[in-house]
Image (cartoon, rainbow, N blue to C red):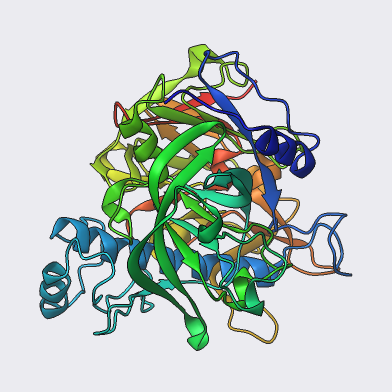
Amino acid sequence: MHPTWSFATFLFTLILFPSLSTAKHDPGENAIRVPLKRSWPVTRSSGSPDSLTPGLVNARSLRAHLKRTVKKYGATFTAYHSNTGSPHPLAPPSTPPRLLRKAERNRRGSLEEYSKVPSFAGESVAVRSSSPSGWISLTEENGDMWIGAISVGTPPQNFTVIFDTGSSDLLLPSTSCNSTCDGHSLYDPSQSATSASLNKTFSLSYGGGSTATGELYSDDVLIGGYEAINQTLGAAVSYSAGFQAPTFDADGLLGLGFPQISVYGQPPVFQTLISDGVLTESLFGVALSSVPGKSELMIGAADTTMYNQSSMVFVSVSLQAYWQIPMDGLSRPGLNNSGEVVIANKTSYAQAIIDTGTTMILTSDANAQEYYADVPGAEVVPSPGQRCLERTRSVPCDLIGSILPTISFGGQAFTVSASTFNLGQVSDNSTNCVAGLAGGGSDYWIIGDVFLQNVYTVFDVGNSQVGFAELL
Protein backbone atom coordinates (compact mmCIF):
# COMPACT_ATOMS: atom_id res chain seq x y z
CA MET A 1 0.00 0.00 0.00
CA HIS A 2 1.30 3.44 -0.89
CA PRO A 3 1.68 6.21 1.69
CA THR A 4 -1.67 7.88 2.30
CA TRP A 5 -2.65 11.21 3.78
CA SER A 6 -6.15 12.04 4.90
CA PHE A 7 -7.23 15.67 5.10
CA ALA A 8 -8.20 15.06 8.74
CA THR A 9 -4.72 13.80 9.58
CA PHE A 10 -3.09 16.74 7.82
CA LEU A 11 -5.38 19.25 9.53
CA PHE A 12 -4.78 17.61 12.90
CA THR A 13 -1.03 17.93 12.46
CA LEU A 14 -1.38 21.60 11.58
CA ILE A 15 -3.44 22.25 14.69
CA LEU A 16 -1.23 20.19 16.98
CA PHE A 17 2.12 21.48 15.77
CA PRO A 18 1.57 24.81 14.00
CA SER A 19 5.29 25.59 13.94
CA LEU A 20 6.35 22.06 13.00
CA SER A 21 3.80 21.05 10.41
CA THR A 22 5.69 21.36 7.12
CA ALA A 23 6.39 17.86 5.75
CA LYS A 24 9.81 17.38 4.19
CA HIS A 25 10.08 14.98 1.27
CA ASP A 26 13.54 16.00 0.07
CA PRO A 27 15.35 12.81 1.20
CA GLY A 28 13.16 10.64 -1.01
CA GLU A 29 9.79 10.57 -2.72
CA ASN A 30 8.28 8.25 -0.11
CA ALA A 31 10.03 9.60 2.99
CA ILE A 32 7.76 11.44 5.39
CA ARG A 33 8.65 13.75 8.26
CA VAL A 34 6.77 13.48 11.57
CA PRO A 35 7.19 16.67 13.62
CA LEU A 36 8.03 16.11 17.29
CA LYS A 37 7.67 18.37 20.27
CA ARG A 38 9.34 18.11 23.67
CA SER A 39 7.14 17.16 26.63
CA TRP A 40 7.85 17.75 30.31
CA PRO A 41 11.51 18.71 30.01
CA VAL A 42 13.58 17.80 33.05
CA THR A 43 14.78 21.39 33.21
CA ARG A 44 12.02 23.90 33.93
CA SER A 45 11.55 26.48 31.20
CA SER A 46 10.25 30.02 31.35
CA GLY A 47 6.90 28.61 30.23
CA SER A 48 6.65 26.18 33.12
CA PRO A 49 3.07 25.91 34.43
CA ASP A 50 4.19 26.06 38.06
CA SER A 51 5.76 28.81 40.09
CA LEU A 52 9.24 27.31 40.42
CA THR A 53 12.17 29.22 39.02
CA PRO A 54 13.03 28.57 35.35
CA GLY A 55 16.38 26.82 34.92
CA LEU A 56 15.90 24.63 37.97
CA VAL A 57 15.92 20.87 37.66
CA ASN A 58 12.43 19.42 37.90
CA ALA A 59 13.42 16.95 40.63
CA ARG A 60 10.00 15.27 40.68
CA SER A 61 10.05 14.69 36.94
CA LEU A 62 13.66 13.51 36.96
CA ARG A 63 13.09 11.12 39.85
CA ALA A 64 10.02 9.66 38.14
CA HIS A 65 11.84 9.42 34.83
CA LEU A 66 14.71 7.44 36.35
CA LYS A 67 12.23 5.08 38.01
CA ARG A 68 10.43 4.65 34.69
CA THR A 69 13.70 3.78 32.97
CA VAL A 70 14.57 1.19 35.62
CA LYS A 71 11.20 -0.50 35.33
CA LYS A 72 11.02 -0.25 31.54
CA TYR A 73 14.24 -2.21 31.17
CA GLY A 74 13.16 -4.76 33.74
CA ALA A 75 9.88 -5.33 31.90
CA THR A 76 11.51 -5.54 28.47
CA PHE A 77 14.21 -7.92 29.73
CA THR A 78 11.37 -10.13 30.91
CA ALA A 79 9.59 -9.77 27.57
CA TYR A 80 12.77 -10.75 25.73
CA HIS A 81 13.01 -13.94 27.79
CA SER A 82 9.37 -14.79 27.17
CA ASN A 83 9.63 -14.12 23.43
CA THR A 84 12.92 -15.91 22.78
CA GLY A 85 13.20 -18.54 25.50
CA SER A 86 16.58 -17.19 26.66
CA PRO A 87 17.59 -14.41 29.04
CA HIS A 88 18.96 -11.26 27.44
CA PRO A 89 22.78 -11.16 27.72
CA LEU A 90 22.57 -7.78 29.47
CA ALA A 91 19.88 -8.92 31.92
CA PRO A 92 20.92 -9.11 35.60
CA PRO A 93 22.68 -12.40 36.39
CA SER A 94 21.04 -12.61 39.80
CA THR A 95 17.69 -13.85 38.47
CA PRO A 96 16.94 -17.17 40.22
CA PRO A 97 17.01 -20.13 37.79
CA ARG A 98 13.52 -21.22 38.81
CA LEU A 99 12.14 -17.83 37.74
CA LEU A 100 13.98 -18.01 34.43
CA ARG A 101 12.59 -21.49 33.81
CA LYS A 102 9.12 -20.23 34.62
CA ALA A 103 9.57 -17.30 32.23
CA GLU A 104 10.75 -19.69 29.53
CA ARG A 105 7.60 -21.77 29.91
CA ASN A 106 5.68 -18.61 29.16
CA ARG A 107 7.69 -17.52 26.14
CA ARG A 108 5.65 -16.21 23.25
CA GLY A 109 2.64 -16.07 25.54
CA SER A 110 2.25 -12.32 25.37
CA LEU A 111 -0.49 -12.11 27.98
CA GLU A 112 0.12 -15.23 30.05
CA GLU A 113 1.69 -15.35 33.49
CA TYR A 114 4.86 -13.32 33.90
CA SER A 115 7.51 -14.13 36.44
CA LYS A 116 8.68 -11.52 38.87
CA VAL A 117 12.20 -10.78 37.67
CA PRO A 118 14.55 -8.25 39.29
CA SER A 119 15.27 -5.20 37.19
CA PHE A 120 18.72 -4.01 36.16
CA ALA A 121 18.83 -1.59 39.10
CA GLY A 122 17.42 -3.85 41.75
CA GLU A 123 13.70 -2.99 41.65
CA SER A 124 10.93 -5.50 40.93
CA VAL A 125 9.67 -5.22 37.41
CA ALA A 126 6.89 -7.42 36.13
CA VAL A 127 4.33 -9.59 37.86
CA ARG A 128 1.99 -11.75 35.84
CA SER A 129 -0.78 -13.39 37.74
CA SER A 130 -2.25 -16.80 36.96
CA SER A 131 -5.21 -15.08 35.32
CA PRO A 132 -5.27 -14.34 31.56
CA SER A 133 -4.39 -10.73 32.33
CA GLY A 134 -0.70 -9.79 32.55
CA TRP A 135 1.16 -7.42 34.80
CA ILE A 136 3.65 -5.20 33.06
CA SER A 137 5.74 -2.94 35.26
CA LEU A 138 6.04 0.66 34.14
CA THR A 139 6.50 3.87 36.04
CA GLU A 140 3.86 6.47 36.61
CA GLU A 141 5.53 9.61 35.37
CA ASN A 142 7.18 11.02 32.33
CA GLY A 143 10.60 12.62 32.11
CA ASP A 144 11.99 14.18 28.94
CA MET A 145 9.93 12.78 26.07
CA TRP A 146 9.21 13.44 22.42
CA ILE A 147 5.64 13.61 21.13
CA GLY A 148 4.30 13.20 17.59
CA ALA A 149 0.97 12.54 15.87
CA ILE A 150 -0.51 9.26 14.58
CA SER A 151 -3.95 8.13 13.40
CA VAL A 152 -5.67 4.80 14.06
CA GLY A 153 -8.64 3.11 12.39
CA THR A 154 -11.01 3.65 9.47
CA PRO A 155 -11.98 6.47 9.37
CA PRO A 156 -8.84 7.73 11.13
CA GLN A 157 -8.89 8.72 14.80
CA ASN A 158 -6.07 11.10 15.75
CA PHE A 159 -3.72 10.77 18.72
CA THR A 160 -0.43 12.01 20.11
CA VAL A 161 2.17 9.48 21.27
CA ILE A 162 5.60 9.44 22.81
CA PHE A 163 8.13 7.76 20.49
CA ASP A 164 10.48 5.47 22.41
CA THR A 165 13.28 3.38 20.85
CA GLY A 166 13.72 1.59 24.19
CA SER A 167 10.38 -0.26 23.99
CA SER A 168 8.25 -1.88 21.28
CA ASP A 169 4.50 -1.59 21.95
CA LEU A 170 1.64 0.80 21.13
CA LEU A 171 -0.67 1.88 23.97
CA LEU A 172 -3.70 4.21 23.69
CA PRO A 173 -6.63 5.15 25.96
CA SER A 174 -10.00 3.83 24.80
CA THR A 175 -13.56 5.17 24.91
CA SER A 176 -14.28 2.47 27.50
CA CYS A 177 -11.83 4.16 29.84
CA ASN A 178 -13.14 5.67 33.05
CA SER A 179 -12.54 9.26 34.14
CA THR A 180 -8.80 8.63 34.47
CA CYS A 181 -8.49 9.14 30.71
CA ASP A 182 -10.26 12.51 30.71
CA GLY A 183 -8.37 15.11 28.72
CA HIS A 184 -6.98 12.59 26.24
CA SER A 185 -8.19 11.66 22.79
CA LEU A 186 -9.83 8.23 23.11
CA TYR A 187 -9.63 5.29 20.75
CA ASP A 188 -13.08 3.95 19.82
CA PRO A 189 -12.78 0.52 18.19
CA SER A 190 -16.52 0.40 17.51
CA GLN A 191 -16.14 3.37 15.15
CA SER A 192 -13.38 1.76 13.10
CA ALA A 193 -14.25 -0.56 10.22
CA THR A 194 -10.77 -2.12 10.43
CA SER A 195 -10.69 -2.76 14.20
CA ALA A 196 -10.79 -6.30 15.58
CA SER A 197 -10.63 -7.45 19.18
CA LEU A 198 -7.94 -10.04 19.92
CA ASN A 199 -10.00 -11.21 22.93
CA LYS A 200 -7.06 -10.72 25.26
CA THR A 201 -6.73 -8.31 28.14
CA PHE A 202 -3.72 -6.68 29.73
CA SER A 203 -3.01 -5.02 33.06
CA LEU A 204 -0.08 -2.66 33.47
CA SER A 205 1.10 -2.59 37.07
CA TYR A 206 2.74 0.46 38.58
CA GLY A 207 4.42 1.18 41.89
CA GLY A 208 1.99 1.96 44.69
CA GLY A 209 -0.65 -0.44 43.40
CA SER A 210 -2.13 1.75 40.64
CA THR A 211 -2.76 0.13 37.28
CA ALA A 212 -3.76 0.68 33.68
CA THR A 213 -5.89 -2.08 32.20
CA GLY A 214 -7.39 -2.75 28.82
CA GLU A 215 -7.87 -5.01 25.82
CA LEU A 216 -5.70 -5.85 22.84
CA TYR A 217 -6.97 -4.94 19.37
CA SER A 218 -5.65 -4.98 15.85
CA ASP A 219 -6.30 -1.97 13.65
CA ASP A 220 -4.68 0.10 10.91
CA VAL A 221 -2.21 2.69 12.21
CA LEU A 222 -1.23 5.73 10.16
CA ILE A 223 2.15 7.18 11.10
CA GLY A 224 3.30 10.17 9.12
CA GLY A 225 1.31 8.96 6.10
CA TYR A 226 2.39 5.31 6.10
CA GLU A 227 -0.21 2.74 7.10
CA ALA A 228 0.55 -0.30 9.28
CA ILE A 229 -2.21 -2.82 8.54
CA ASN A 230 -3.65 -4.95 11.36
CA GLN A 231 -1.29 -3.51 13.94
CA THR A 232 -1.61 -4.82 17.51
CA LEU A 233 -2.31 -2.10 20.08
CA GLY A 234 -3.38 -1.92 23.70
CA ALA A 235 -6.61 0.01 24.36
CA ALA A 236 -6.62 1.10 28.00
CA VAL A 237 -9.78 1.25 30.10
CA SER A 238 -8.01 2.95 33.01
CA TYR A 239 -4.93 5.15 33.32
CA SER A 240 -2.78 5.60 36.39
CA ALA A 241 -2.01 9.10 37.67
CA GLY A 242 1.16 9.38 35.62
CA PHE A 243 -0.75 8.93 32.36
CA GLN A 244 -3.51 11.36 33.28
CA ALA A 245 -3.82 14.83 31.79
CA PRO A 246 -2.35 17.36 32.26
CA THR A 247 0.64 15.57 33.80
CA PHE A 248 1.03 13.37 30.72
CA ASP A 249 0.81 15.48 27.58
CA ALA A 250 0.58 12.65 25.05
CA ASP A 251 -2.36 10.32 24.63
CA GLY A 252 -0.21 7.17 24.55
CA LEU A 253 3.10 5.48 23.78
CA LEU A 254 4.63 4.05 20.59
CA GLY A 255 7.71 1.83 20.85
CA LEU A 256 10.31 1.68 18.08
CA GLY A 257 12.42 -1.20 19.39
CA PHE A 258 12.67 -4.73 17.96
CA PRO A 259 9.95 -7.40 18.28
CA GLN A 260 12.01 -9.39 20.79
CA ILE A 261 11.17 -6.93 23.59
CA SER A 262 7.46 -6.54 22.79
CA VAL A 263 5.46 -7.28 25.93
CA TYR A 264 2.49 -8.04 23.68
CA GLY A 265 4.61 -10.60 21.83
CA GLN A 266 3.62 -8.96 18.52
CA PRO A 267 5.45 -7.01 15.77
CA PRO A 268 5.95 -3.32 16.58
CA VAL A 269 4.55 -0.63 14.29
CA PHE A 270 7.73 -0.07 12.29
CA GLN A 271 8.21 -3.80 11.63
CA THR A 272 4.61 -3.95 10.39
CA LEU A 273 5.38 -1.14 7.94
CA ILE A 274 8.35 -3.15 6.68
CA SER A 275 6.24 -6.30 6.29
CA ASP A 276 3.59 -4.32 4.42
CA GLY A 277 6.25 -3.25 1.92
CA VAL A 278 5.40 0.46 2.02
CA LEU A 279 8.86 1.84 2.88
CA THR A 280 11.51 2.80 0.36
CA GLU A 281 14.13 2.12 3.00
CA SER A 282 13.66 0.15 6.22
CA LEU A 283 14.99 2.86 8.48
CA PHE A 284 14.00 5.99 10.36
CA GLY A 285 15.96 9.07 11.31
CA VAL A 286 15.63 11.08 14.52
CA ALA A 287 16.60 14.63 15.38
CA LEU A 288 15.92 15.81 18.95
CA SER A 289 16.21 19.39 20.14
CA SER A 290 14.88 21.71 22.81
CA VAL A 291 14.60 24.34 20.05
CA PRO A 292 11.03 24.44 18.66
CA GLY A 293 10.82 23.18 15.08
CA LYS A 294 14.10 21.27 15.18
CA SER A 295 12.84 17.86 16.35
CA GLU A 296 11.55 15.25 13.92
CA LEU A 297 11.08 11.58 13.16
CA MET A 298 11.74 10.81 9.48
CA ILE A 299 10.04 7.62 8.29
CA GLY A 300 11.65 5.66 5.47
CA ALA A 301 14.81 7.76 5.09
CA ALA A 302 17.31 9.98 6.82
CA ASP A 303 16.76 13.73 6.52
CA THR A 304 19.99 14.79 4.81
CA THR A 305 19.10 18.45 5.26
CA MET A 306 19.74 18.14 8.99
CA TYR A 307 23.24 16.63 9.22
CA ASN A 308 26.72 16.66 7.75
CA GLN A 309 26.63 13.64 5.44
CA SER A 310 30.42 13.16 5.43
CA SER A 311 30.38 12.72 9.20
CA MET A 312 27.91 9.80 9.24
CA VAL A 313 29.19 6.55 10.80
CA PHE A 314 27.27 3.30 11.18
CA VAL A 315 27.66 0.67 13.88
CA SER A 316 26.11 -2.82 13.66
CA VAL A 317 23.52 -3.80 16.25
CA SER A 318 24.98 -6.39 18.63
CA LEU A 319 21.69 -8.19 19.26
CA GLN A 320 18.24 -7.43 17.86
CA ALA A 321 16.12 -6.49 20.85
CA TYR A 322 17.14 -3.01 21.91
CA TRP A 323 19.14 -0.68 19.67
CA GLN A 324 22.27 -2.08 21.28
CA ILE A 325 25.69 -1.36 19.76
CA PRO A 326 29.35 -1.52 20.85
CA MET A 327 30.76 1.74 22.19
CA ASP A 328 34.37 2.57 21.33
CA GLY A 329 34.85 4.76 24.36
CA LEU A 330 33.67 7.42 26.76
CA SER A 331 35.94 10.01 28.33
CA ARG A 332 36.05 13.54 29.69
CA PRO A 333 38.76 16.17 30.06
CA GLY A 334 40.90 16.07 33.18
CA LEU A 335 40.90 18.99 35.59
CA ASN A 336 43.85 21.13 36.67
CA ASN A 337 45.99 20.05 33.74
CA SER A 338 45.55 16.38 34.57
CA GLY A 339 45.20 13.79 31.84
CA GLU A 340 42.00 12.73 30.13
CA VAL A 341 39.68 10.64 32.29
CA VAL A 342 38.85 7.48 30.30
CA ILE A 343 35.85 5.56 31.61
CA ALA A 344 35.48 3.12 28.70
CA ASN A 345 37.55 2.23 25.62
CA LYS A 346 37.64 -0.48 22.98
CA THR A 347 39.22 -2.96 25.38
CA SER A 348 36.27 -2.45 27.75
CA TYR A 349 33.95 -4.11 25.21
CA ALA A 350 31.27 -1.68 26.39
CA GLN A 351 27.73 -2.10 25.07
CA ALA A 352 25.41 0.87 24.65
CA ILE A 353 21.63 0.99 24.18
CA ILE A 354 20.46 3.98 22.15
CA ASP A 355 17.22 5.10 23.76
CA THR A 356 15.14 8.16 22.77
CA GLY A 357 12.92 7.42 25.78
CA THR A 358 15.67 8.08 28.34
CA THR A 359 16.86 11.57 29.24
CA MET A 360 20.29 10.89 30.72
CA ILE A 361 23.39 8.81 30.07
CA LEU A 362 23.05 5.92 32.52
CA THR A 363 25.73 3.47 33.60
CA SER A 364 26.92 1.48 36.60
CA ASP A 365 27.57 3.11 39.96
CA ALA A 366 31.26 2.27 39.59
CA ASN A 367 31.53 4.03 36.22
CA ALA A 368 29.66 7.08 37.51
CA GLN A 369 31.83 7.25 40.61
CA GLU A 370 34.94 7.16 38.44
CA TYR A 371 33.56 9.87 36.18
CA TYR A 372 33.05 12.34 39.05
CA ALA A 373 35.87 11.12 41.32
CA ASP A 374 38.16 14.17 41.11
CA VAL A 375 35.51 16.83 40.45
CA PRO A 376 35.49 19.34 43.36
CA GLY A 377 32.05 19.85 44.82
CA ALA A 378 30.45 16.86 43.10
CA GLU A 379 27.72 15.42 45.29
CA VAL A 380 24.60 13.26 45.28
CA VAL A 381 21.47 15.22 44.34
CA PRO A 382 18.98 15.50 47.24
CA SER A 383 15.23 15.47 46.70
CA PRO A 384 13.45 17.15 49.65
CA GLY A 385 10.75 15.03 51.21
CA GLN A 386 11.73 12.01 49.10
CA ARG A 387 14.55 9.58 48.74
CA CYS A 388 17.64 11.06 47.16
CA LEU A 389 17.97 10.86 43.39
CA GLU A 390 20.32 8.18 44.41
CA ARG A 391 22.98 7.95 41.75
CA THR A 392 22.47 11.36 40.19
CA ARG A 393 25.19 13.92 40.78
CA SER A 394 25.46 17.67 40.82
CA VAL A 395 28.65 19.65 40.25
CA PRO A 396 29.44 23.38 40.50
CA CYS A 397 27.60 25.11 37.65
CA ASP A 398 30.70 27.00 36.58
CA LEU A 399 32.59 23.72 36.30
CA ILE A 400 30.10 21.58 34.38
CA GLY A 401 31.34 22.81 31.00
CA SER A 402 34.82 21.50 31.86
CA ILE A 403 33.76 17.87 32.33
CA LEU A 404 31.71 17.23 29.19
CA PRO A 405 31.70 13.61 28.00
CA THR A 406 33.00 12.57 24.61
CA ILE A 407 31.48 9.33 23.32
CA SER A 408 32.94 7.38 20.39
CA PHE A 409 31.06 5.10 18.02
CA GLY A 410 32.42 3.56 14.84
CA GLY A 411 35.72 5.38 15.22
CA GLN A 412 34.05 8.80 15.41
CA ALA A 413 34.05 10.94 18.55
CA PHE A 414 31.05 13.08 19.52
CA THR A 415 31.22 15.56 22.41
CA VAL A 416 28.12 16.38 24.43
CA SER A 417 27.36 20.09 24.65
CA ALA A 418 27.21 22.00 27.92
CA SER A 419 23.60 23.00 27.22
CA THR A 420 22.41 19.38 27.09
CA PHE A 421 24.73 17.99 29.78
CA ASN A 422 23.64 20.63 32.29
CA LEU A 423 20.12 19.71 33.42
CA GLY A 424 19.76 22.83 35.56
CA GLN A 425 20.33 24.19 39.05
CA VAL A 426 19.60 21.90 41.98
CA SER A 427 17.58 24.59 43.77
CA ASP A 428 17.14 28.34 44.16
CA ASN A 429 20.40 30.02 45.17
CA SER A 430 22.33 26.78 44.63
CA THR A 431 25.66 27.03 42.82
CA ASN A 432 25.44 23.36 41.82
CA CYS A 433 23.83 21.99 38.67
CA VAL A 434 22.68 18.44 37.90
CA ALA A 435 24.94 16.69 35.39
CA GLY A 436 23.56 14.43 32.66
CA LEU A 437 25.46 11.22 33.50
CA ALA A 438 24.20 9.03 36.34
CA GLY A 439 24.77 5.64 37.93
CA GLY A 440 22.20 3.13 39.05
CA GLY A 441 22.49 0.94 35.97
CA SER A 442 24.65 -2.03 35.07
CA ASP A 443 27.92 -2.49 33.19
CA TYR A 444 26.26 -1.52 29.93
CA TRP A 445 25.39 2.07 29.01
CA ILE A 446 22.03 3.62 28.19
CA ILE A 447 22.61 6.54 25.86
CA GLY A 448 19.72 8.94 26.15
CA ASP A 449 18.74 12.40 24.99
CA VAL A 450 21.61 14.20 26.74
CA PHE A 451 23.75 12.71 23.97
CA LEU A 452 21.16 12.31 21.20
CA GLN A 453 20.38 16.03 21.08
CA ASN A 454 23.94 16.52 19.81
CA VAL A 455 23.72 14.21 16.79
CA TYR A 456 21.42 13.06 14.02
CA THR A 457 20.61 9.38 14.59
CA VAL A 458 19.61 6.79 11.99
CA PHE A 459 17.93 3.58 13.16
CA ASP A 460 18.44 1.21 10.23
CA VAL A 461 16.22 -1.83 10.75
CA GLY A 462 16.96 -3.37 7.35
CA ASN A 463 20.74 -3.48 7.90
CA SER A 464 20.51 -3.80 11.69
CA GLN A 465 22.70 -0.79 12.42
CA VAL A 466 22.69 2.64 14.05
CA GLY A 467 24.17 5.71 12.42
CA PHE A 468 25.35 8.99 13.97
CA ALA A 469 26.24 12.24 12.25
CA GLU A 470 27.03 15.83 13.20
CA LEU A 471 24.07 18.18 13.08
CA LEU A 472 24.10 21.13 10.68
Residue at 32% of width from left, 45% of height from top? 258
Q: Is residue 451 above or below residue 80?
A: above
In this rendering, would 166 be left or right of 63? Answer: left
Work out which quarter of the rendered image holds the N terminus and state it: top left
Q: Position of residue 213 (x, y in %)?
A: 46, 75
Q: Nearer the viewer, residue 422 or 355?
A: 355
Q: Quadrant of residue 459?
A: top left
Near-viewer residue (297 or 393):
297
The answer to which image quadrant residue 142 occupies is bottom right
Quadrant in which the C terminus is drawn: top right
Q: Which residue is nearer to you in this view: 250 or 423?
A: 250
Rendered view: 364 above or below 384: above
Q: Measuring 81% from the left and 57% from the top, which residue is drawn there?
A: 55
Q: Position of residue 306 (x, y in %)?
A: 62, 21
| Residue located at (62% from left, 59% from top) | 251
> Closest to the observer: 259 or 182?
182
Q: Position of residue 434 (x, y in %)?
A: 66, 60
At horizontal 11% and vertical 79% (from top left) the residue drawn is 98
Asked whether the viewer can see residue 381, the reply is no
Vertical arrangement, residue 285 with respect to residue 52, above or below: above
Residue 61 in the image: state x and y as whole percent. Answer: 66, 67
